[in-house]
């Protein structure tokens, strides 16, 4: 039986608290290969990757901007370019870092993970990209932050 | 009161400082450090009344910072602000000498309750 994934609503509860906005999630679709932007991996004590989150550029831009209240102009430019700035990506990392708590607080699942890395799609080895296509379990979500376009995020487990 | 905010994320330091202000602690003198090593250097040359520190950071993590401070006899009031909110992490933090642990993400109320309690006890 695969490791359980958090309830989708817990993800928006977490981002809502973190970003200070009424965020929400709804069921989405897998992010197409050419729209994946960043992948965070979560490791246990033995450095085994148990979970990962995949985001598209819009999630990285919107969550990364909302966290630090970045100016609208900067957000629009990044959305137009389809790429988060380094600051947005650093902030998105922090959102995904805090998201580790969702995996650690699943009932009756005594595991402990922490974020290892947040990598851009192009920085990942092809073997790992291949692994992303066959997780043990996945949840694809559309993530909404008021005032921003919807982003996409996938939570998955390999075990 | 002098407060040192330690987190490798600039955005999180900003959020912690903003929440300190929302908690009515905006009048205190606030200094920032981006990892445990930098915080240790600041604490070696300057007196602080409270340290608000992330757990997972590069260079020197929060637990290592707290252990190093206690090892050299520094009694500064120390609280963790971290995504590591499990019972075992809370126990580790307490055993290392932390006064409290606020898990991220936090509300102004939970943050305020922990910090105000520490400030009043300082």
Image (tube, coloured by chain):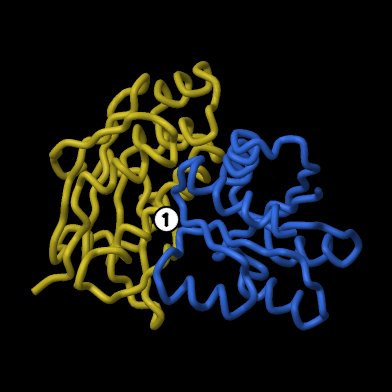
- The residue at 30%/75% (across/down) is A111
Q: Is the residue B14 above or below the residue B90 in the image?
A: above
Where residue B50 sits: x, y (%)?
73, 57
Horizontally, residue B82 falls left or right of residue A4, namely right
Q: Is the residue A72 above or below the residue A140 in the image?
A: above
For mark 1, name the chain: A
Where residue A78 sits: x, y (%)?
46, 26
- The residue at 59%/49% (across/down) is B9
- The residue at 77%/83% (across/down) is B71
Chain the render paints yellow: A
Please tell me which residue lies in front, A97 or A48: A97
Chain the render paints blue: B
Q: Secondary structure at mark 1?
A: helix
Furthest residue toward right: B45
Quadrant (top left, top right, bottom left, bottom right) of the N terminus of chain A: bottom left
Q: Is the residue B114 above or below the residue A24 in the image?
A: below
Q: Which residue is mark 1?
A: A123
Q: Write down the quadrant of residue A49 in the picture.
A: bottom left
Please tell me which residue lies in front, B121 or A49: B121
Where residue B73 sits: x, y (%)?
82, 79
Quadrant (top left, top right, bottom left, bottom right) of the C terminus of chain A: bottom left
């Amino acid at each position: 039986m695969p490791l359980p994934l958090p309830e989708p609503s817990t993800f928006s509860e977490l981002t809502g608290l973190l970003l200070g906005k009424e965020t929400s999630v709804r069921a989405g679709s897998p992010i197409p290969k050419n729209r994946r932007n960043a992948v965070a991996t979560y490791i246990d004590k033995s450095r085994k990757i148990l979970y990962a989150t995949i985001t598209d550029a819009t999630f990285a831009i919107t969550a990364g901007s909302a966290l630090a209240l970045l100016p609208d102009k900067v957000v629009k430019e990044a959305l137009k370019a389809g790429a988060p700035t380094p600051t947005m990506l650093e902030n998105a990392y922090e959102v995904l870092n805090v998201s580790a708590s969702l995996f650690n607080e699943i009932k009756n699942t005594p595991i402990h993970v922490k974020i290892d890395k947040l990598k851009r799609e192009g920085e990942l080895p092809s073997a790992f990209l291949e692994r992303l296509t066959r997780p043990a379990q996945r949840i694809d979500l559309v993530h909404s932050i008021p005032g921003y376009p919807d982003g996409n995020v996938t939570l998955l487990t390999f075990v | 009161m002098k407060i040192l905010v330690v987190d490798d994320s600039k955005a999180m330091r900003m959020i912690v400082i903003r929440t300190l202000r929302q908690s009515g602690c905006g009048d205190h003198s606030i200094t920032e450090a981006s990892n445990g090593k930098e915080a240790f250097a600041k604490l070696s040359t300057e007196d602080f009344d409270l340290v608000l520190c992330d757990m997972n950071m590069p260079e020197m993590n929060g637990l290592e910072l707290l252990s190093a401070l206690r090892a050299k006899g520094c009694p500064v009031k120390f609280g963790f602000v971290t995504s590591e909110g499990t019972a075992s992490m809370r126990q580790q933090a307490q055993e290392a000498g932390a006064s409290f642990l606020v898990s991220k993400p936090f509300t102004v109320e939970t943050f305020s309750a922990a910090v105000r309690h520490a400030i009043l006890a300082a």
